[in-house]
Amino acid sequence: MAQYIILYLGGDRFPENNNPPDPNFDQTASKAKWGKWVQDLGAAAVNPGTPMMHSKIVSPNGVSDAGKQGSTGYTIVKAKNMDAAIEMAKGCPYLEMGSLEVAELMQMPR
């Protein structure tokens, strides 16, 4: 089976990403939903998740802030094809606060 990365994009509700706190956001409940989703993925979850903070864009023109649509984390899953990986992503509760990008990881020779 191939491996796919599910990138978390945005996530305006996280104060640790320099955003004002959302009084309606329950971070404990959000983490519990995410934990249930990962548990439901079972063995398909190769790396259940790694959060990221304060990303920068590096280009030939210099360095800039990624802004509110930058990557905020990722999960790596095993799936038989892109459609199966997308179905896994559709169940991710992160969609309540941001978007997801799904991409197949290429196997590179060492």
Image: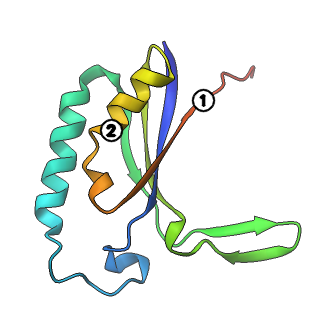
Q: Is residue 73 above or below residue 26?
A: above
Q: Is residue 29 above or below residue 86?
A: below
Q: Nearer the viewer, residue 11 or 74?
A: 11
Q: Which mark is residue 105?
A: 1
User: Picture coordinates of residue 48 (x, y %)?
Assistant: 34, 39
Secondary structure of residue under mark 1:
loop
Colour style of the rendered protein structure: rainbow
User: Picture coordinates of residue 32 (x, y %)?
Assistant: 13, 52
Label 1, label 2: how many angstroms apart (C-alpha)?
19 Å
Identify residue for label 2: 90
Q: Say which label, 1 or 2, has the lower sequence index.
A: 2
* Identity of the residue drawn at 87% across and 73% down: 61
User: Picture coordinates of residue 50 (x, y %)?
Assistant: 40, 50
Q: Which mark is residue 46?
A: none
Q: Amino acid at mark 1?
A: Leu
Q: Amino acid at mark 2?
A: Lys
For disc 1, the neighbor class at 10 Å (few under 14, some 14 to 19, many from 20) is: few
Count up the numbered dots: 2
For disc 2, the neighbor class at 10 Å (few under 14, some 14 to 19, many from 20) is: few
Quarter of the image with the C terminus is: top right
* Identity of the residue drawn at 23% across and 81% down: 22
